[in-house]
Image: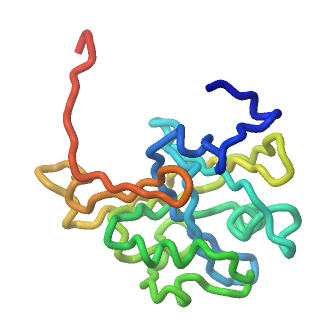
């Protein structure tokens, strides 16, 4: 089949987010100007540069009390920092609990009973037991077409790696089975990997 998004797809559910899969999940921790911590997962997330290391995530909906966006973007707009927490399979249920449309006063760390730790290079909390945490300084927020679409870019200023995820000098993703987002309500987990050598290497 072929469809133009502006004309609709005629299917029971929008297939777009099931096409670009699997997607890594950025579990974004922020702290508001009022000192309240926030934690929410975003599947429009990825690394975008090596030197200096940079990441991005996109927020695509809004809350009535956040001026056209969600808590994460609003907090980052105010403070200029955020922390990306990598999600392992074992954390799937607590991650999912933090995805709810909670009031801005709710601390999702406390709601989901997630141990928090303080970041080293920024004023922000992080998921203490996550396989890895990326402390980030905001570089830019880009308004995308659409009512509440924002892409947030940050430079990584500090990296935490959980000791048991380091094997023979490498960060071993199979040691914690990263959780990934598929389409609709579906997720997947990475349990296998293989290597390919690029031409010319």
For this orientation, the residue located farthest to the top is 200
Residue 94 lies in quadrant: bottom left
Compared with 133, 124 (above or below) is below
Q: Nearer the viewer, residue 121 or 102?
A: 102
Compared with 38, 50 (above or below) is above
- Residue at 72% of width from left, 70% of height from top? 71
Residue 123 in sight from this viewpoint: no
- Residue at 69% of width from left, 61% of height from top? 80
The figure's colour scheme reads rainbow
Q: Give the percent coordinates (x, y) of residue 199.
A: 26, 11
Number of callouts:
0
Q: Give the percent coordinates (x, y) of residue 74.
A: 77, 66
Q: Give the percent coordinates (x, y) of residue 3.
A: 71, 28
Position of residue 96 in the picture relative to residue 2 (left or right):
left
Position of residue 74 in the picture relative to residue 127 (left or right):
right
- Residue at 58% of width from left, 58% of height from top? 42
Residue 179 lies in quadrant: bottom left
């Amino acid at each position: 089949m072929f469809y133009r998004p502006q004309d609709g797809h005629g299917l029971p559910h929008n297939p777009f987010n099931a096409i670009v899969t699997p997607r890594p999940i950025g579990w974004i921790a922020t702290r508001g100007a009022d000192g309240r911590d926030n934690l929410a997962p975003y599947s429009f997330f990825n690394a975008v540069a090596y030197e200096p290391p940079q990441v991005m995530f996109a927020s695509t909906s809004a809350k009535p009390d956040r001026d056209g966006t969600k808590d994460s973007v609003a907090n980052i707009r105010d403070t200029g920092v955020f922390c990306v927490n990598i999600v392992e399979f074992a954390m799937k249920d607590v991650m999912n609990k933090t995805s709810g449309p909670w009031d801005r006063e709710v601390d999702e760390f406390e709601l989901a009973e997630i141990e928090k730790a303080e970041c080293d290079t920024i004023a922000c909390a992080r998921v203490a037991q996550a396989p890895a945490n990326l402390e980030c300084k905001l570089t830019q927020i880009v308004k995308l077409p659409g009512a509440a679409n924002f892409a947030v870019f940050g430079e990584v200023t500090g990296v935490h790696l959980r000791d048991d995820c380091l094997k023979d000098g490498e960060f071993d993703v199979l040691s914690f089975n990263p959780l990934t987002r598929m389409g609709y309500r579906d997720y997947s987990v990475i349990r296998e990997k293989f290597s390919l050598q690029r031409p010319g290497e």
